[in-house]
Image (tube, rainbow, N blue to C red):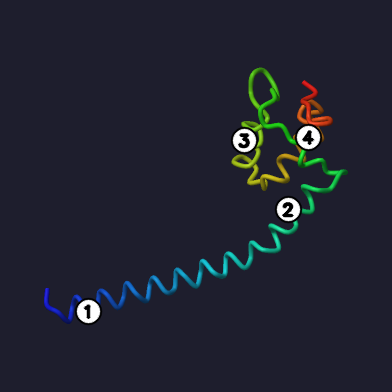
Amino acid sequence: MNWTMHRKKIQSAEEELEQLEENQMAIEEELVPLAEEFAKLLANPLVKLGHFCGECSWHRGTSCASRVEYLMNTYRDSKVKAQVALMENTPSCDRQNGETSV
C-alpha cells in the first residue's frame, strides 16, 4: 500500500470515530430523562422498587433476579417493568423494612 491509501484509511477511520462519538453523545442525552424517571420510581413508596430483592426465591429455587431476566428476554420487558410485575405477583419479592418476607 502506498501513503495515499494509508491516509484514506486513516481519514475514513477518523470519520467513523467521529460518527460513533456523536451517536454516543445522543444516546447519553436520551438516558438523562430515563435516569431521572428511574430515580423517581425508586423513591416512590407506592412502587416499592427500592425494596426489590433479587436474591429471594421466586419459585422452586429460581431467584427473583433470574425471573426478571427471563421476563426481560422473553417478553422484551424493561427491567423496571419486570421487577414491578414480579413484585405485584410474588409478595415474597417485596422486602418489608429491609428484610425479605420469604
When asked about the image quadrant of residue 97, the answer is: top right
| Residue plotted at (32% across, 72% down) | 13
List the residue tagged with mark 1. 7
- Tell me which label, 4 or 1, sits earlier in the chain: 1
The secondary structure type at the circle numbered 1 is helix
- Tell me which label, 1 or 2, sits earlier in the chain: 1
Name the amino acid, label 4.
Met
Name the residue nearer the viewer: 21 or 98: 98
Task: Give yes or no for contact between labels 1 and 2 (Cβ–Cβ under 8 Å).
Answer: no
Task: Give yes or no for contact between labels 4 and 3 (Cβ–Cβ under 8 Å).
Answer: no
Say if 12 sits above or below 52 in the image: below
- Tell me which label, 3 or 2, sits earlier in the chain: 2
List the residue tagged with mark 4. 87
In 3D space, how far apart are the residues under numbered discs 4 and 3 (Cα atoms)?
Answer: 15 Å
Quadrant in which the N terminus is drawn: bottom left
Name the amino acid, label 3.
Tyr
The image position of residue 70, as x and y in percent, is 62, 35
Nearer the observer, disc 4 or disc 3? Answer: 4
When asked about the image quadrant of residue 61, the answer is: top right
| Residue plotted at (57% across, 65% down) | 27
Nearer the observer, disc 3 or disc 1? Answer: 1
| Residue plotted at (31% across, 75% down) | 12
In 3D space, how far apart are the residues under numbered discs 3 and 1 (Cα atoms)?
Answer: 48 Å
Say if 75 sits above or below 9 in the image: above
The secondary structure type at the circle numbered 4 is helix
| Crowding at mark 1 (Cα within 10 Å: few <14, some 14-19, many 20+) | few
Residue 70's label in the rendered image is: 3
| Crowding at mark 4 (Cα within 10 Å: few <14, some 14-19, many 20+) | many
